Image (cartoon, grey):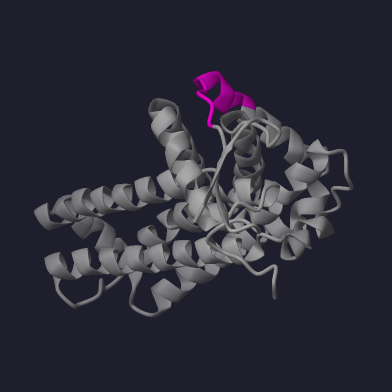
Amino acid sequence: MAGFHVMADARGMHVQPTVRRITSADLWDALRLGADDFWAKPSHYVFLCLIYPIVGLILTQWSSGSNAIQLIYPLMSGFALVGPFAAIGLYEISRRRELGMNTDWRHALDVRRSPALPAIAVIGITLLALFLLWLYTAQAIYTGLFGDQPPASIGAFIREVLTTSKGWTLILLGNAAGFVFAVVVLATTVIAFPLLLDRDVGVVSAIETSARAVMANPLQMALWGLIVAVLLVLGSIPLFAGLAVVMPILGHATWHLYRRVVEPERAQQIRRPM
């Protein structure tokens, strides 16, 4: 397993790819190109795209059937936390299309052959841990306000949330906590997975480059986060069915955003030992 490396690249070096400044026009262009990738051969994505609405419905059914109605909204919003990892096969399709390679949907599974797979897995597990921590935090906020008693029904829960002071406090505290989780994920993974697919730079460099991209483009990245959040909400409303289109378009668009934010590998970049 000489090629097994996680924190640094294959040579044990910490790479610092050059980060560009972008404009809001780059965001809309990335979305346009993401939509182009999706509509080029949308039938190829049925296998991947149906995963999201199906999982969403399963999670909603689980939360309703296990007296966890209060977790339906956190589960829905939690898609934004695991989305960067869930869309990794779509980044691969966009990468292959950019290079003029075969973009059959089966190649989305070629990620398993990437030399950066260990690093990808580490960041993916981290996102899953953040997702679970978010659910725990949301449950803790609910319990602190309403106690251990679960809601009697969805209707009763909605009425209590919208018509009582405790309900409005739940909305404010829950969204504030969710905002913190979303900012952490955006700042550390906005372009981490596309970067790892493109170059085997290791976990540290991928996360650091994402953070530098956000610091170099704070307003643009904030707008990107808002765009992602709004589209995910719109895609979740009709029984999660819209996610079958929203998620792949966002996944493809994230690849193109990466291409605009990070200089190509041939550009000068800093390497230093870990």
**Stretch in magenta:** 19-29
Q: Position of residue 243 (x, y in %)?
A: 59, 50
Residue 28 among magenta residues: yes
Q: Position of residue 230 (x, y in %)?
A: 45, 39
Residue 59 among magenta residues: no
Decide if residue 222 is in sight here: no
Relative side of 98 to 58, left or right: right
Residue placed furthest toward the bottom: 66
User: Which of 62 and 108 lies nearest the eye of the viewer?
Assistant: 108
User: Which of 261 and 165 lies nearest the eye of the viewer?
Assistant: 261
Q: Which residue is at 58% across, 62% downward?
A: 119
Residue placed furthest toward the left: 165
* Corner quadrant of residue 114: bottom right
Q: Which residue is at 71% across, 61% downward?
A: 115
Residue placed furthest toward the front: 273
Relative side of 155 to 25, left or right: left
